[in-house]
Image: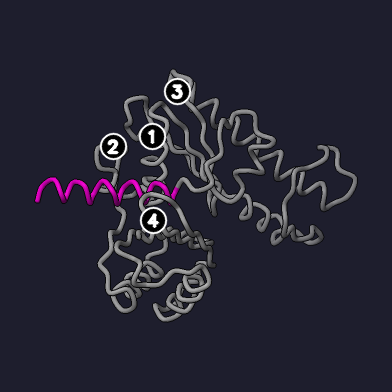
Amino acid sequence: MLLAVDIGNTNTVTGLFDRGRLCGKWRMRSQRGMTCDEIHLFCSNVFSGSGFAYKDVTGVIISCVVPSIGVSFEEFCRKYLCRSFLRVDETSALNMQLLVDNPHSIGADRIVNAVAAFSKYRSSLIVIDFGTATTFDVISKDGAYLGGSISPGIRIAAEALYRRTSQLPEIREFRLPDRAIAKNTSDAMNAGIIYGYAGLVDGIVRRTAREMETSPKVIATGGFASLISGVAETIDSVEPDLTLEGLRIIHEKRENNKAASA
């Protein structure tokens, strides 16, 4: 089985694949300073609770945007899984050209999402990931990574609104607004954030499509993808496990290349 690990700024998602099928997925908070032993406690609990064991893991791939947590996961792999691991970087895009100023600066999650989306759709694409930041990644019809845009994530925007004002409440849960003309402060903030982000998404997608001079398919993933897809006009499809699938694809291609060159 393949253990795929996506370490984000807010959450770390782990997935277990058996012959290409995602058979388990778990989420934990990305806490800077966590040790490999703490990761072991989490993983051993969710594994045993789902009927899996460490001995089932035959490969590990890690996508990481928080270096300190990545180091702890690597120590966990060596100490508890007794396995080597593949760490995603700009070379992991394999046959995908990275047509940006500095390929090394592209976030590992953005590379993984681009690989996964083009592998599935084989067309020009805009991939939106609603994470701590909201990222827009652009892929040409030939499968080249063209760059993209980054905006503050929904929760960051809401937290800034709460922290930088005296009387606005903290919004802990977001929902599809009933209307734009809200009748109380909490509903007004929820409507402003959700409809505002839908407008942000549609605006960036339309500008990007004009620059591409094509009609790209628009894919959304990440924690708020389903919610925003309900109000945005330009999202074609939601892929909740896009990043984990991208990790699986990259690992399989690397293993196939190693076998072919052996």
Q: Residue at x 26, y 46 (%)?
A: 253
In the picture as drawn, the residue positioned furthest to the front comes out as 51
Q: Residue at x 39, y 32 (%)?
A: 139
Q: Amino acid at mark 1?
A: Phe
Q: Is residue 245 magenta?
A: yes
Q: Secondary structure at mark 1?
A: helix
Q: Secondary structure at mark 2?
A: loop
Q: Is residue 151 magenta?
A: no
Identify the residue position indicated by label 3 in the image: 211
Between discs 3 and 2, the one toward the N terminus: 2
226 w.r.t. 155: above or below: above
Q: Amino acid at mark 4?
A: Asp
Q: Residue at x 68, y 37 (%)?
A: 230
120 w.r.t. 69: above or below: above
Identify the residue position indicated by label 1 in the image: 118
Q: Residue at x 39, y 70 (%)?
A: 68
Identify the residue position indicated by label 4 in the image: 18
Q: Residue 54: where, in percent of width, then height?
A: 37, 72
Between discs 2 and 4, the one toward the N terminus: 4
Q: Residues within 10 Å of mark 3 (few under 14, many from 20)?
A: few
- Residues in magenta, as a range: 243-262
Q: Amino acid at mark 3?
A: Glu
